[in-house]
Image (spheres, rainbow, N blue to C red):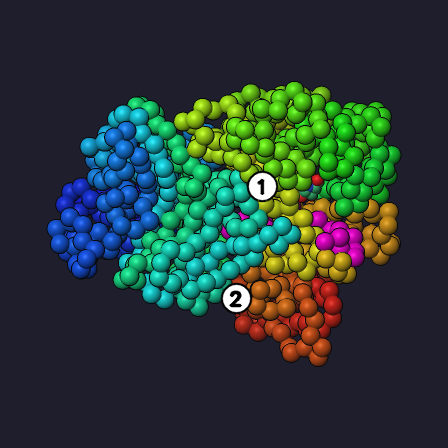
Amino acid sequence: MISFDRKNETFYLHTKNVTYAMGLCDGNKLLHRYWGKRLKNPLKKIDLMDFPFRSFAAMDLSNTSSDVVPFEYSAFGTDLRVPSVEFTFSDGTMVAQLTYQSHEITEGKPKLKGLPATYCEEGDAVQTLRIHLADTLQNIEVVLSYSVFEAWDAITRSVEIINHGERMVLDAVMSATVDFYGSPERELIHLDGAWARERFLTKQPIVHGNQGIDSRYGCSSAFHNPFIALCDKNTTENYGNVYAFNLVYSGNFKAGVERNAYGCDRAYIGIHPTDFRFVLEKGDSFQAPEAVLVYSATGLGEMSRIFHRLYRTRLCRGKYRDIERFALINNWEATYFDFNEDKIVEIAEKARQIGIDTMVLDDGWFSSRLSDKNGLGDWYENRDRLPNGLEGLSKRIHEKGMRFGLWFEPEMVNPGTELFRKHPDWVLQVNGRKPALSRNQFTLDLSREDVCDYIIETVGGILSRVPIEYVKWDMNRTMSEPGSMFWNELRQGEVMHRYMLGLYRVLETLTQRFPDVLFEGCAGGGARFDPGLLYYVPQIWTSDDTDAVERLKIQYGTSMVYPFSTMGAHVSAVPNHQLHRRTSFEMRCYVAVMGQFGFELDLNQCTDEELATAKKTIETYRKYGAVFHRGDCYRLKSPFEDNLFAAEFISEDQDTVILIVACSQPTPNAPDTFIRFRGLDETAVYQLEGSDQRFYGDHLVNIGWHFLNNQESQSLLLIFHKI
Ligand code: DGJ
């Protein structure tokens, strides 16, 4: 619920458990007042004198210092900290001062033009507050939008800049900045990584100065994720105040916190300003991406559950949002580039026998794509491999009663292709400089409308011609030389953001045109795992690292923000192709079944015992997928702290509880470990499936499940039913 207390000039954004408040000072300065546990009583009117004067730092704020006043959204030049927004005006000056003009509160939530965002449905208690700020001298309007998802306990923010004055340049625009007044004991949490090691949980104390994370790689990246949280020192899964920010964007971003001399923290998140420079003519506007703000009074576990509920119901869209998806087999790790139609059919046949419903053909099916050196851009079948074309293969897969899925990497081109010969100007490049190759490929310039149209026609043409039910949309390089042959010298600083707008248009068009196709995102593993992409594709390949032990950390870290329903997770062969580690088949199944389950090996090489385990796990996935994907997840043991991962999933109706435990490294003669459940009905009794054992809820919560971590690949999947 959103309200405005006229007398005290205070805005309140209330969700079920949270309050976010802003106040007007002197009738025109919009200040941040509060974010935290829901307040029951009104705040008194804010006064600048509430903020003590700091010598040498005063701006003209009537005897207080602008670098301690918690501006809700501030411009460069009138606030000495990291500004929310930076301009260069036609007169060459850069200073702006944003003052309150008006506001309106409306029901629901408008769409963000051209950008992904959370949405509401008919009947949802969602309201939006729009506050209009302006720099009256330069004629700039800044519209701050806040939407309150009451039942979800989440608040979203976005910013629109409208130029009513002369041509100017938008140099930086944060989607959210929030000031924390006096907070010396806070820590910063983020998700760092690399290829095959995505989204590892990182905590660091906040120190004086500016600190944070970013991506300048052209995608949200494997190195950092557009997520930060400020939290109390010693925050755990179940304890501590957590203030989390996640940017609904798949491109370059910057997020961090600046601690000033007096212990005030300013958190910020938005498009990376380094290669961003947007020219706005008179009458033009710029819409910045959405930031999702989540507060939890009880640690990281609750923060994650809030993100999970919001993302799986009000960010992901389409036919597959609420239904169980596919149990698939992908040929990549089984064959790499070495396959033909018969080999794929042979893999599919074995998969069908154990209940797999979808065969996905990965990289290498087209034109000259015999290795990763050529072919990208020429999207027609390689007839040596597929003599009957995609239609022929799709037909044979469908005759088995299975679905057919196909891999694409439409944003890229290899230099040896017909596409590149015809359109060398279609790749990202800066006039006169040779663009760098990475994985032997160039990035197509999706800031261009003609390139985007070409991708829509090419991929759309194949999806119209061939019966295909699943698409894996890959993207395998970071983007360098971010320039365009299409845009003039004024617009070169717009290319990377225009690339994202182009990509989003392509994805929107294709997903709307082919609503029955399940799209999965991918980027050299999980290098573009972000809420921006999840608006178009309900699941993303989590990592190229399919080693079960590494996956414990990768999936644990990813689950900080993203629900298991969004994580592609496959069982692969041993020794594992990335780490050469051996883990049991059972452990590989239990680790993968939490996500969108699949296999990525030649099942013809598996033993009967392994096939039986695979079959049983597929049955569990079909029967209980909804518990993993629509229930609540409680992380019980962290592989970042112990040699153990444990997570519990409780179904929406609270009747089914699944415990998954997997050990990353055994300890000889290990100490007794008790895995204590959470969120159970402590007055209820739970029956363990497949046995006659029953357990009191309070015993499971307070005593826990005894587990001895003393064997390699030790793992458990236990299903309990409330009786
Ligand atoms: C990277 C992906 O993450 C892999 O799964 C596979 O599709 C390869 N690309 C194919 O080139």
Residue 345: quadrant of the picture? top right
Say whether disc 1 or disc 2 marks the residue closer to the N-terminus. Answer: 1
User: Residue at coordinates 75% horizontally, 53% vertically from top-left?
Assistant: 577
Q: Quadrant of ligand 1?
A: top right
Relative to 228, say whether 640 is above or below.
Answer: below
Quadrant where the C terminus sits is bottom right
Seen from the viewer's position, the closer of residues 455 and 44 is 455
Residue picked out by circle 1: 478
Kind of residue at badge 1 = Thr
Query: In screen coordinates, is 374 left or right of 91?
Result: right
- Asked if the beta carbon under badge 1 is closer than 8 A to the nearest atom of ligand 1, the reply is no
Circle 1 residues within 10 Å: few <14, some 14–19, many ≥20: many
Q: Which dot marks residue 146?
A: none
**Image location (x, y in percent) of residue 648:** 59, 60
Residue at 65% from the left image edge and 30% from the top image edge: 413
Residue 33 at what x, y percent from top left?
26, 52
Instruction: Give, as a single range, the part of the protein colored magenta.
Output: 561-578
Which residue corresponds to the image point at 37% horizontal and 39% vertical from the top-left? 172
- Secondary structure under the numbered disc 2 in the rendered image: loop
Outermost residue toward the front in this view: 432
Secondary structure of residue under mark 1:
loop
